[in-house]
Image (cartoon, rainbow, N blue to C red):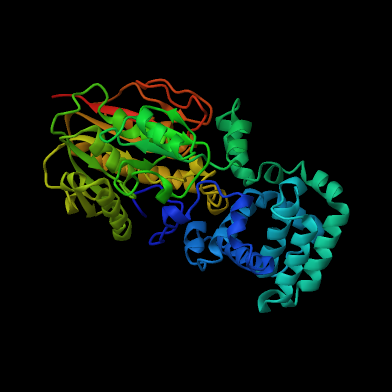
Amino acid sequence: MSQKPRTHQAGATALPAAARPQSPRAGDLSTAQSLPLWRQLQVTAAVVQAVRSGRSLTAELASVTPELRPGVQALTFQVMRQLGRAMALRERLASKAPPPAADALLCTALALSWQGDDAPYPVHTLVNQAVEAARLQRQTQAQSGFINGCLRRFMREREALVAETDSDPQARWNHPRWWVTRVQDEYPEDWQTLLGMAQQPAPMSLRVDTRHHSVAEYQAQLLAMGLAAQPVGASGLQLERAVPVHQLPGFAQGHVSVQDAAAQVAAPLLLQGREAGQAWRILDACAAPGGKTGHLLACYPNAQVLALDVDAERCQRIEDNLQRLGAQNQARAQVRAADAALPAQWWDGVAFDAILLDAPCTASGIVRRHPDVRWLRRPGDSAQLAQTQARLLKALWPLLAPGGRLLYCTCSVFRSEGDDTVQAFLQRNTDARMLPSPGHLIHGKIPTGLPVKHNALGEHDGFYYALLEKERD
């Protein structure tokens, strides 16, 4: 397993940032208007079928041809966000599921059209083109009549069919039933907000490297280009609308990085209250793709950082990120492909002053950015990942110098991957004490334990932070 919260399979290649909008919307389809809609629906359904069989959306979109990718990505994101409703509708239209390719195409059409006002195209156009998509490919040709009949009935009885599915929590909230139940149990006051926020496209947040510009100066540069942004956290800006990274001034020169506001908490929190200019020796234990590594180097100008990731391909992404951030950052960072849980294979025996452990998790806090995650996860995944998290904590704690700090974080809202894991660790390690920490960050909640107000815009992804300090001898 990779030493990083994964939303895709090991070895998968993520889309380049410029080709990966933060918030795919129906308007993104304009880039593919010259392509027939039936063809886009065929490819979208194939991607949906792959996700339903356990493959990641990121990896599948990377394999889509460039001319189809923008339209397919926008359609697929919308399908993933409405798949629970679509599956419930299909069960009422046909109690027996058709073959997988036909079922994926039918569910794709239902997901895109069940809310007429939010449909990317007129519903009758989607239905006609879905039937054409079925007729024009071998995998679904035999079921084209069945798909046509189901969709025509849906158009006639849409209001009644939707009302019938409202009592199904998977349809109502477009998350697996077990997921809905868990969030209800763990967040009895906020569960509806959490599930509802997961349905919204995520904002595009930037981290300004204040060694080049102040946040206000960079905000002014954006405004001069017609890009409105609001400050978030200590050095962040949240864009009013997402744009390709090549449009951001100074991006290629490392003046700014794309990083969610919740992830921007990590680097400054790690050594909060300590002298930033000291020559700290820092381990970034699960570092890919390198956003937090770059932030550590910016926060602590004399630090030496060892960045690990178990996946060599993902290590290359760290290297690429450091190269963009500049030669000085590259000189102060070492990148190694290694399993953080096996320090005998990579540790030189010199203790670290600080360790950042961004542990593997279900990624349940970033579903709005990766809407396939909810359909890929299984009820037992969280407990299994909690074991991995505990194993990493146990392996890395001895590498920390007395008086040193370890910041444990995950991009999960499930408590078994956050506070439960940390409390169990504290019970087993009497030389560890918890410093003021944000704990579970959720949408719309302003956390305590931070020097700067965060989440005032409700902009955070779901995250967990616990700052641990090792007692001195």
Q: What residue sits 30% from the left and 44% below the top? A: 254
From the top left corner, tell me how far across and down residue 440 is, in percent: 45, 30
Q: What residue sits 76% from the left and 69% below the top? A: 131
Q: Quadrant of the C terminus?
A: top left
From the top left corner, tell me how far across and down residue 246 is, in percent: 40, 51
> From the viewer's perspective, is 61 left or right of 170?
left
Q: What residue sits 52% from the left and 58% below the top? A: 57
Judge whether 466 appears above or below 152 on screen: above
Judge whether 71 appears above or below 402 on screen: below
From the top left corner, tell me how far across and down residue 439 is, in percent: 42, 27
> Within the image, what quadrant is residue 217 found in?
top left
**Is residue 151 among what the camera can see?**
yes
Q: What residue sits 47% from the left and 61% below the top? A: 59
Q: Nearer the viewer, residue 233 or 56?
A: 233
Q: Nearer the viewer, residue 30 or 85?
A: 30
**Is residue 52 among what the camera can see?**
no
